[in-house]
Amino acid sequence: MSGIRATHELHARRLSRNLGVAFALALLVAVVFALTVVKVKRGDPLQGFDHVVRPEMEASGS
Amino acid sequence: MPDLAISAAHEHEPNFGDYVALLKPRVMSLVVFTALVGLLVAPAALHAVEAIAAMLFIALGAGAAGALNMWYDADIDSVMRRTMKRPVPSGRVAQDEALAIGVGLSGLSVVMLGLATNMLAAFLLAVTISFYVVVYTMWLKRRTPQNIVIGGAAGAFPPMIGWAAATGSISLEACLMFALIFMWTPPHFWALALFMRSDYEDAGVPMLTVTHGRPAARRHIMAYTLLLVPVSLWLALGPIGGPVSLAAAVVLNLMFVRGAVQICRRDEAVAQGDGYAAEKAFFRASLFYLFLHFGAFLADAVLRQVS
């Protein structure tokens, strides 16, 4: 009787595919988050709580 | 026999590596490198995160174009020795799956590049993907021996995309980088066609070697190699050039022209006798030519920063 394998080779391929897709999605989320942080930090001189432009912030450069 | 039943139904299920192979990673690496140089030599700076994101989405766009090319060319890829082991002709990835992945990644890469940088870069990426898939793959490749001349424009866009991502505009330097790759593409691929011998003929692809004969292809390689020289010198003497670029341009062009002269002087009997050694050497040299040219532009950009 040939050796009994715990899992079929098909499952190894599926695991590889699922892990790869999970990694790619996680990378996309991380990139989008990092981009958001950079762009918001560099954004217009407005305060976050009401998204209103404040000229005094523009003058002070903050 | 449950094990056999599983095997029969799912023996062609791909793993993640098959999906990566679908995106033509070797082509992607050249695209990313030239786009990165275009971005870094541009007279504007992106935040590091934006630059990394831009490179990622440009790579994804290039991969999407590769997947769509594999979807459409599955029939001729299965005939050619060079391409028969690709994921679609070998049955590891279904043709419909390649189409879905290509379309999905195209949309994602263009939209995300636009959000990460600007609409001009996104537009140029969309043009690149469309040009490669529709103009080259679906239209020109099977119809004209000038397929690689016109279709080569797709591979020439990346440095322009990198430049546009950084500056939001196009300039003469970006167009010259485009021109360098555009003029480089025909001799690169015609040298490949010379030593791939009957591959393109078997697939019915009208490469110059098939439609006009190998002696004509050799003369065309010489002509395009000579046309490359003024383009590379113009770049080396321009704003993105410098001492390193000029030295590289002189040495690489001498080497490349010498290789083209060798190819032009040979005939098929001599070439077959030595297993197409000169043609293979020229093809390898063409990879170094482009890589070192763009590396030299980068080196001069660093020197300008330092000084």
Image: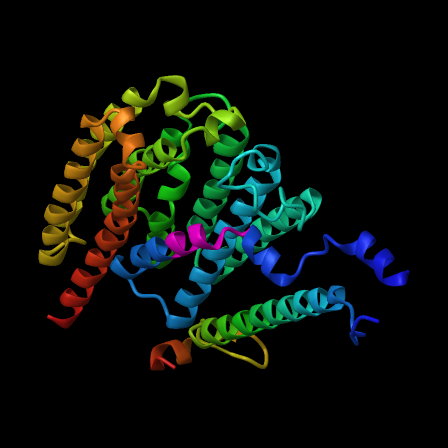
Say which of B262 and B286 sits in front. B262
Task: Name the quadrant of the N terminus of chain B.
Answer: bottom right
**Relative horizontal placement of residue B244, taking residue B292 as reference (left or right):** left
Q: Name the residue at the right extreme.
A: B1
Q: How many labels does the image show?
A: 0
Give the image location of residue B242, x and y in percent.
Answer: 11, 56
Picture residue at 55% right of the left edge, 74% below the top = A30
Residue B303 to residue B190: above or below: below
Q: Is residue B167 visible?
A: no
Q: What stretch is highlighted in magenta?
A: B23-32
Give the image location of residue B10, x and y in percent.
Answer: 78, 55
Task: Name the quadrant of the C terminus of chain B.
Answer: bottom left
Say which of A49 and A31 sits in front. A31
Picture residue at 52% right of the left edge, 41% below the top = B83
Give the image location of residue B194, x and y in percent.
Answer: 35, 31
Q: Can residue A31 be seen in this view?
A: yes
